[in-house]
């Protein structure tokens, strides 16, 4: 069995992913999303920058996909430019990337790649780009890893008075566990090849900083994970589905895993059920939605605390009953005064104080709902589209609802080019200034943070900014503070869709808009901007829909 660095990396992210990548039916895989293709493109460009390579880049997401399929996406060591400072800082004195060499071997012939890499190491090559490290672990297990660089340094090894250390270039901002695990695998396989443990294993990350992996910590962890991974794969143990938005959203098995989770009413689909909480629920024998909805809160309280226990049970009830319910909190336990109730007299006649244990039925409202949502004759609904890599907020969309005039008007303040951000910020200020009493509804805190950022960047006076921010109403916060809904997450998409709202362009997401904006910048094709504008307007309208629904719901159901 061949076990590659990539398989181990995915195993660390999700055991099921590694299993399916080895044994799953490839026809069940989803096509890569545009955003994933963009990440690959950005990762490719990052590697080129660090290595000082000047290959022409693919022009947009689809072209990246094409080049990846052709096996051309990895940068080749030609057309050298200055290497990054981060890489320069980890190169030993006298080691020059001008002498960078790659092993020559037929694609996917790992044995040939490993032999060619050993030859380069024996020759004392300064830097080896994408060498292949291969070790036969046991009679039927072959381990393979391909660090981005093998860097020569002084020392004693199988090859002479020199040895190598591995280096990986990663696009993540942090030294994630899976990166360090793979760096430890590089170190271990290199140690077997050169018969001495490398002194260090390097990571170079997205912000160009270098990071030294602590091998004394990560080598044993890697060996443990590797052993578990081999066991699962050898024994064909298919790991259970667990849907987590963060790890599953870009996975090519998402559709098939999601279908399984839905058919099982899997608890991971319930907001608030994290992997750790899921494990705890399992240990209590709570394995179904029905069981969780009926669990006395005090059974969960000692594990999760009272608020999370309340939330989990009420969320299960909302999902099971497929209806919105007011978010409530148990009555605070009341200490009964001594001597008063008969039950408070102990057998020996002494008085004791007792605490009335609340039941699931003894719930009270968590908030004064009546003040939760402002309402006005003119209301503004605000949503932003951004390009994080350019540090740019390129579309400030405002939907103006004038209830007395019965009109609706959408204003897309759009920077067709990054340098127009200042101008759209001013247009935004001019529009919101026309309605000084109108509340500004938005979803999540991104809008508030962005308005602060833009105000600082473009020197907007505090006298203008403070009253503006005081009009902002975060509908995400209002929803999660007041109601439980039968949704899988409290995202705008899930909430508005549950209310029956549909986006005009099905399938477009916020992260896809980032790709579309890049495509517009590269091609000048206006249809990309039109799609983004439609999406942004629909986000504003969805927020409007949600606000009206929540206002009516709270009016109708608030017990206060
Ligand atoms: S969709 Fe999620 S659970 Fe399924 S393999 Fe991918 S990461 Fe794992």
Image (cartoon, grey):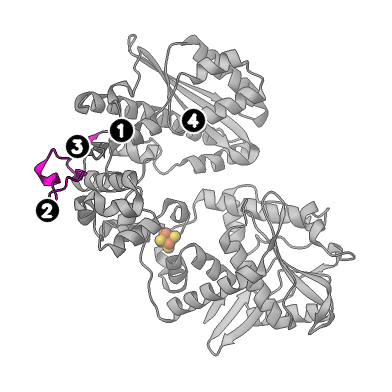
Circles 2 and 4, Cβ within 8 Å, touching? The answer is: no
Evaluate whether residue 502 shows in this view: no
Lower sequence index among marks 3 and 4: 3
Return the disc, 4 or 1, that comes first in the chain's sequence: 1
Q: Residues within 10 Å of mark 3 (few under 14, many from 20)?
A: few
Q: Is residue 354 magenta?
A: yes
Q: Quadrant of ligand 1?
A: bottom left
- In the picture, the disc for residue 347 is 2
Residue 368 % position (x, y): 29, 25
Q: Are marks 3 and 2 in contact (CB under 8 Å)?
A: no
Query: Could you tell me if the residues under marks 3 and 4 are in contact, i.e. CB atoms within 8 Å?
Result: no
> Magenta stretch?
339-364
Q: Is residue 116 left or right of residue 360?
A: right
Pointer 3 residue: 337
Which tag is nearer the camera, tag 4 or tag 1? 1
Q: Which residue is mark 4?
A: 533
Residue 44 picture location, percent across and down: 66, 55
Local secondary structure at mark 3: loop
State the separation of the CA atoms marked 3 and 2.
18 Å
453 w.r.t. 42: above or below: above
Residue 421, compared with residue 432, is above or below; it is below
Q: Secondary structure at mark 2?
A: loop
- Residue 52 lies, with reference to residue 479, above or below; the image says below
Instruction: State the CA–CA distance, disc 2 to disc 1.
Output: 45 Å
Residue 124 within the magenta-colored segment of the rendering: no
Mark 3 or mark 2, earlier in chain: 3
In the image, 377 versus 310, the foreground residue is: 310
User: Which residue is under mark 1?
Assistant: 482
Q: Earlier in the sequence, mark 1 or mark 3?
A: 3
Q: Main secondary structure of the magenta part?
A: loop
Whether residues under marks 2 and 1 lie with C-beta atoms below 8 angstroms apart, the answer is no
């Amino acid at each position: 069995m061949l076990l590659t660095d990539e398989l181990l990396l995915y195993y660390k992210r999700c055991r099921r992913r590694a299993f399916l990548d080895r044994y799953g039916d490839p026809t069940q895989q989803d096509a890569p999303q545009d955003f994933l293709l963009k990440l690959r493109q950005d990762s490719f460009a990052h590697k080129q920058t660090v290595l000082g390579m000047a290959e022409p880049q693919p022009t947009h997401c689809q072209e990246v996909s094409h080049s990846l399929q052709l096996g051309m996406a990895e940068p080749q060591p030609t057309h050298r430019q200055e290497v990054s400072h981060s890489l320069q800082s980890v190169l030993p004195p006298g080691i020059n990337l001008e002498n960078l060499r790659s092993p020559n071997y037929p694609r996917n012939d790992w044995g040939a790649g490993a032999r060619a890499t050993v030859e380069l190491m024996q020759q004392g090559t300064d830097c080896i780009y994408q060498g292949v490290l291969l070790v036969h672990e046991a009679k039927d297990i072959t381990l393979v890893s391909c660090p981005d660089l093998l860097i020569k340094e002084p020392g004693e090894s199988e090859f002479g008075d020199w040895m190598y250390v591995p280096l990986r270039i990663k696009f993540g901002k942090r030294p994630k566990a899976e990166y360090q695990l793979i760096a430890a695998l590089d170190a271990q396989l290199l140690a077997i090849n050169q018969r001495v443990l490398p002194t260090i294993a390097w990571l170079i990350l997205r912000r160009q900083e270098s990071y030294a992996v602590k091998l004394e910590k990560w080598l044993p962890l890697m060996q443990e994970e590797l052993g578990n991974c081999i066991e699962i794969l050898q024994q064909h143990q298919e790991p259970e589905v667990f849907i987590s938005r963060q790890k599953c959203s870009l996975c090519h098995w998402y559709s098939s895993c999601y279908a399984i989770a839905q058919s099982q009413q899997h608890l991971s689909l319930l907001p608030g059920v994290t992997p750790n909480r899921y494990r705890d629920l399992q240990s209590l024998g709570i394995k179904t939605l029905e069981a969780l909805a009926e669990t006395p809160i005090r059974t969960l309280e000692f594990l999760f605390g009272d608020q999370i226990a309340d939330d989990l049970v009420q969320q299960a009830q909302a999902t099971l009953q497929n209806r919105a319910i007011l978010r409530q909190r148990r009555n605070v336990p009341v200490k009964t005064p001594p001597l008063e109730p008969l039950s408070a007299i102990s057998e020996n006649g002494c008085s004791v104080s007792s605490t009335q244990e609340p039941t699931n039925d003894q719930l009270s409202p968590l908030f004064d709902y009546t003040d939760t949502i402002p309402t006005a004759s003119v209301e503004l609904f605000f949503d932003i589209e951004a390009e994080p890599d350019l540090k740019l907020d390129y579309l400030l969309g405002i939907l103006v609802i004038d209830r007395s005039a019965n009109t609706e008007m959408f204003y897309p303040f759009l920077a067709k080019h990054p340098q127009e951000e200042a101008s759209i910020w001013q247009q935004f200020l001019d529009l919101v200034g026309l309605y000084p009493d109108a509340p500004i509804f938005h979803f999540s805190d991104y809008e508030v943070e962005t308005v602060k950022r833009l105000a600082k960047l473009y020197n907007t006076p505090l006298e203008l900014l403070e009253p503006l921010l005081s009009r902002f109403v975060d509908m995400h916060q209002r929803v999660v503070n007041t109601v439980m809904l039968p949704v899988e997450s409290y995202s705008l998409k899930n909430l508005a869709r549950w209310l029956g709202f549909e986006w005009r362009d099905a399938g477009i997401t916020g992260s896809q808009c980032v790709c579309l904006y890049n495509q517009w910048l590269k091609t000048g094709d206006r249809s990309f901007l039109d799609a983004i504008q439609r999406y942004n307007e629909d986000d504003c309208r969805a927020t409007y829909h949600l606000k009206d629904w929540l206002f009516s719901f709270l009016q109708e159901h608030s017990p206060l």
